[in-house]
Image (cartoon, rainbow, N blue to C red):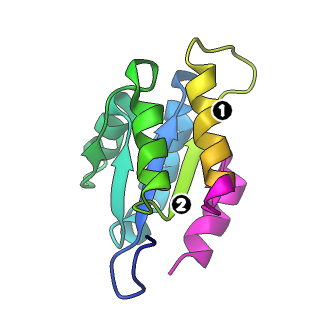
Amino acid sequence: MKTKQNKRKTIALLAHDGKKALLAAFVRDHRSRLRCFNLIGTGNTGLLVQSAGLEITMKLSGPLGGDAQIASEVIAGRCDAVIFLRDPLVSHPHDPDIAMLMRNCDVHNVPLCTNVATAELILKGIR
């Protein structure tokens, strides 16, 4: 079941450790636009978003199952876009969960971006 048009859209925000500073800058730069959405994120990334003065529903940290929890929100139709600034140069022990999240975004036609350029496009395009 997809989110109804008149409801506030939900965006998931995630970032690997090597990209958290980049996500912090993105959140600061787009704080006023991000206030228009329900935000969900993994634990440590959620703390970063909170420190920018935004409300966010936090799931577990990625390695503890947070990526899988975000994937379940996508599957249930409760997430309208995923901004995941991932570090492609580092292997992560929870790579299978990350792949599952990305696959489910594709299966359920939920926009997914993995860099700031496409994150900005998502913010411009989502209504």
Amino acid type, residue under disc 1 in the picture: Ala
Residue 120 sits above or below residue 9 on the image: above
Residue designated by label 2: 81
Residue 112 sits above or below residue 125 on the image: above
Q: Which residues are magenta?
A: 107-127
Q: Name the side, left or right, on which 47 lies relative to 13.
A: left
Q: CA distance from mark 1 to mark 2?
A: 16 Å
Residue 6 lies in what quarter of the image?
A: bottom left
Where is residue 82 shown, x and y percent of the image? Answer: 54, 53
Q: Residues within 10 Å of mark 1 (few under 14, many from 20)?
A: some
Residue designated by label 1: 99
Where is residue 54 shown, x and y percent of the image? Answer: 27, 55
N-terminal of the pair, mark 1 or mark 2, is 2
Residue at the extreme bottom of the image, as rendered: 6
Residue at image x 42%, y 86%? Answer: 5
Q: Is residue 85 visible?
A: no
Where is residue 106 shown, x and y percent of the image? Answer: 69, 54
Assess whether residue 63 is covered by the magenta stretch.
Answer: no
Q: Which label sits in the foreground, 1 or 2?
A: 1
